[in-house]
Amino acid sequence: MLYLLGTRGWHARTCAVTRCARFHVNAVAKAAKATQRPESSKLKPKPGVVAPTPWTAKDLQNLKQMYEKGIQRRDIAKRLGRSRAAVTARIFHARETQKWTPTVQRWDEIQEKKLLALRDQGKTFVEIGRILGRPGRNVSNKFRQLRPGTTGARKWTNEEHEIASKLHSKGYSVRQIARELKRTPRTVKYYQLLGNQYRPKTSDEEFEMFEMHEAGFATCAIADKLGRRPNTVRSWLEPKPKPVNMRRFTPSEDARLLQLRTSRKSWKEVRDAMGPDRNTLQLRARFYRLISGK
């Protein structure tokens, strides 16, 4: 038994040594062929592919200055003549090794006035950011602080509709129309894609729409007759919900609400006790506002 095990072990060791020797001989032969290969047969870079340019000390200094000023990476790449991926990788490496921290530029009165003037001209936040050397998100946040509640798209008027139609028929681009109307190019482009659906509804259209609807015409037929989209006509025909009357809480209601909640009543019991014109959402919001002292 011991003799057989020893024989098997000797055979396995012999096979392993033989394989290693063969592998070593083949590897040496391949390496010799590679060193003796002529220059014409070696791999060459593809035509049109430029090798990456090494970063110089001046490039790194310019990169650091532009990065700390808050300039976007694609603009940095254009100024340095490099790809955006290369700039991103270099910034990541610099932040990991040198602890780069971009400094925050404070807004002064001149930049705020320039921001409002450029926005009134129909410039987008990205375009304004490139002019001022700031990120687009920083510009949009500052604009919301200067003009709160004005970032939403305003409705199109009849005068704007006529101007946009005339300019579009003359071959004006989306940006040119936006500058004339003091709107953003995105709203003008969306307006054109919808097929001028921001055009207000006239009294004649409303009368003809309801007359055809009562006669049994389909929504698509009414839309073709009026030159509107079926979804627009469908939204006009749907009954509008009644506006919710948000009546203010009286001092007696506030005292009643606090008394019910301090007595550990559930919100359902509080709603039933406060009356039918109050819902649970209103009561919860009012209660938390009272206890927070706002």
Image (cartoon, grey):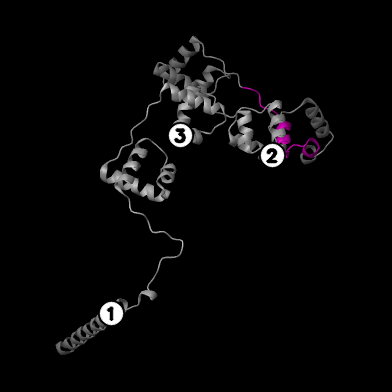
104 vs 276, nearest the viewer: 104
Residue 42, image x, y percentages: 37, 73
In this view, the residue farthest toward the top is 251
**Which label sits on residue 140?**
none
- Residue under label 3: 137
Residue 283, image x, y percentages: 49, 21
Q: Quadrant of residue 102?
A: top left
Q: Is residue 5 left or right of residue 181?
A: left
**Which label sits on residue 171?**
2
* Residue at (78, 25) in percent of width and height: 203
- Residue under label 1: 32
Residue 205 colored magenta?
no
Residue 41, image x, y percentages: 39, 75
First-in-chain label (1 vs 2): 1
Residue type at tag 3 = Arg
**Magenta residue span:** 223-243
Q: Tag 2's secondary structure?
A: loop
Residue type at tag 1 = Ala
Q: Nearer the viewer, mark 2 or mark 3?
A: 2
Residue 250, image x, y percentages: 51, 11
Q: Is residue 93 left or right of residue 112?
A: left
User: CA–CA distance between discs 1 and 3?
Assistant: 59 Å
